[in-house]
Image (cartoon, helix red, strand yellow):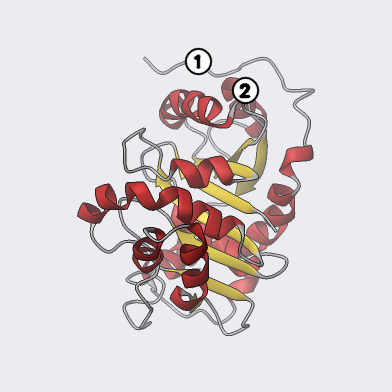
Amino acid sequence: MAVYALVSAGGSPGVTTTALALALTWPGRVLLAECDPACGDILAGLFAGHLRAPRGLLGVAFEAGRGPSAAAAELAGQLAPLDDTGGRMFLAGLSDPRQAAGLAPAWPAIARALAGYGADVIADCGRLDGGDGQPASVLAEAAVVVMVLRPTLRQVAGARPRVDMLGQLLGGTDRIRLALVGDQPHASREIAAALGVPVAATLPVDAKTAAVLSDGEGRRRGLSDRPLMRAAKAAGPSIARAPGLAMAGLAPAGIRSAP
């Protein structure tokens, strides 16, 4: 079992939508954990406010004051079902960004609890900005950290310093991978070469499916047959085996820094 953390390079690349698509198609039991200090979106988005979830992340954080074992014991009681399969669970995030600063001391215990959970964990860690409220412990615990971005100059420019930040935190870039949302205007090989880390997945721009996942608009019936979900189903195994991917063969940088 492993933790897979997703982060944003800035802008609106669709980190939460990507995390949801991966969790709903993951090959095996999985927990989707909202670890974004800027607040979680899933209860008000996908579930449109209709899911009565426990306190989630905040509930685990309260128990973290008693130590890592208490946080781990509390985790199971703070979960809600992500779908009706019984194998996909959900840990709701913060509901108020003002809670993030108080959560900072609890992140190490939360990270250990997630790492000790009896299934793979997909942690939506939101935008990486280097602030004190960031879930750095969750990122450090992750087997793979996936940076979600669109293949544009602006997003690549925002990703560069954040790849450096992650490299410092993780002791190198071996565990960093990219997930691209869309395949234009730059190819995945160009993006990988520009940032010095491989692309593990490319997901289509699928506005109709994204609206269901991000805002609960439309029906979930037939969701698995839609382009985004089919791509996410293929991306899951690729991300899970990402530590074994090789950097060899990357083309020379084809993208320059935005002015």
What is the quadrant of residue 252 in the picture? top right
Residue of label 2: 196
Percent x, y of residue 124: 47, 54
Depth order, front residue of 148/73: 73
Check the picture and name the quadrant holding the C terminus: top left
Instruction: Write the residue at 58% across / 45% down.
Output: 141
> Element at badge 2?
loop
Percent x, y of residue 26: 67, 64
- The residue most toward the left is 98
The CA distance from mark 2 to mark 1 is: 13 Å
Instruction: Write the residue at 38% across / 79% down.
Output: 53
**How busy is the neighbourhood of tag 2: few (under 14 within 10 Å), some, or many (20 plus)?**
some
Instruction: Write the residue at 37% across / 77% down.
Output: 54
Instruction: Write the residue at 39% across / 65% down.
Output: 63
Q: Earlier in the sequence, mark 2 or mark 1?
A: 2
Depth order, front residue of 224/58: 58
- Taking the image as shown, residue 109 lies to the left or right of residue 37, namely right
> Element at badge 1?
loop
Q: Can residue 206 be seen by looking at this rendering?
A: no
Percent x, y of residue 253: 62, 16
Residue of label 1: 256
